[in-house]
Amino acid sequence: MYKNIVFHWTGGNYAPCSLDFNAYHFLVDKEGNVSSGKYTPEDNLNCGDGKYARHCGGGNTGRIGIAICCMKDKNTPPLQKQVEAMCKQAARLCYLYNINPNQCITHAEFGLAYPNTSSKGKQDINILPYANKYGEKTCGDYLRNKTQVYYDRIKRGYYG
Ligand SMILES: [Zn+2]
């Protein structure tokens, strides 16, 4: 049973590095291309065997991690193309795994909700400069709303 999907940024360049593939289930590069990580979402249903994507400290079980590759520094902010691709991928996963798009959260929101975990103080995703969105809740709502739009399109039979 999946709890939700967690939105991240990698804190790296616009392309995934080798460590990123271990940490996240899906990675989105500069052009919006989505790559699969080493572990599948199913691997995070039971983390007891130690083989799972460690994307969300204190909350990896039942959570799928998608990361946009960005935010190494101020010159590598999240790009619109990446965010759209991330939310589209999240919508596909919500549809596939029966997750409510409204349950998707950012890593930063998870850290705020669970301050006794190593996710406390995580920044991703609290700024989306291209969209003029700032703050945990504002960015989280923006990403959830976008995921919902893609989800509704999928439900209507539009998979593009
Ligand atoms: Zn994160």
Image (cartoon, rainbow, N blue to C red):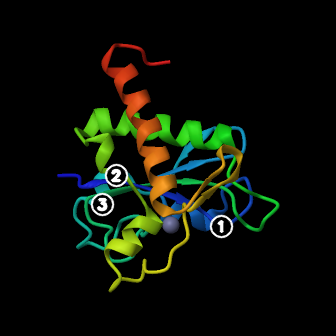
Q: Position of residue 86 (x, y in %)?
A: 53, 42
Residue at horizontal 31 percent and vertical 45 percent from the top: 102
Instruction: Return the disc, 1 or 3, that comes first in the chain's sequence.
Output: 1
- Left/right placement of residue 91 relative to residue 68 reads left
Q: Is residue 21 above or below residue 47?
A: above
Residue 142's tag is none
Residue at horizontal 48 percent and vertical 34 percent from the top: 88
Residue position for label 3? 44
Residue 41's tag is 2
* Residue 148 in which image quadrant: top left
Question: Which amino acid lies under the numbered mark 3 shown in the image of this protein?
Answer: Asn
Alpha-carbon distance for marks 1 and 3?
22 Å
Question: Which amino acid lies under the numbered mark 1 shown in the image of this protein?
Answer: Gly
Question: Which amino acid lies under the numbered mark 2 shown in the image of this protein?
Answer: Pro
Q: Is residue 38 visible?
A: no
Alpha-carbon distance for marks 1 and 2?
22 Å
**Within 10 angstroms of label 3, few (less than 14), some, or many (20 or more) residues?**
many
Q: Position of residue 114 (x, y in %)?
A: 32, 77
Camera-nearest residue between 152 and 48: 152
Marks 2 and 3 in Cβ contact (< 8 Å): yes
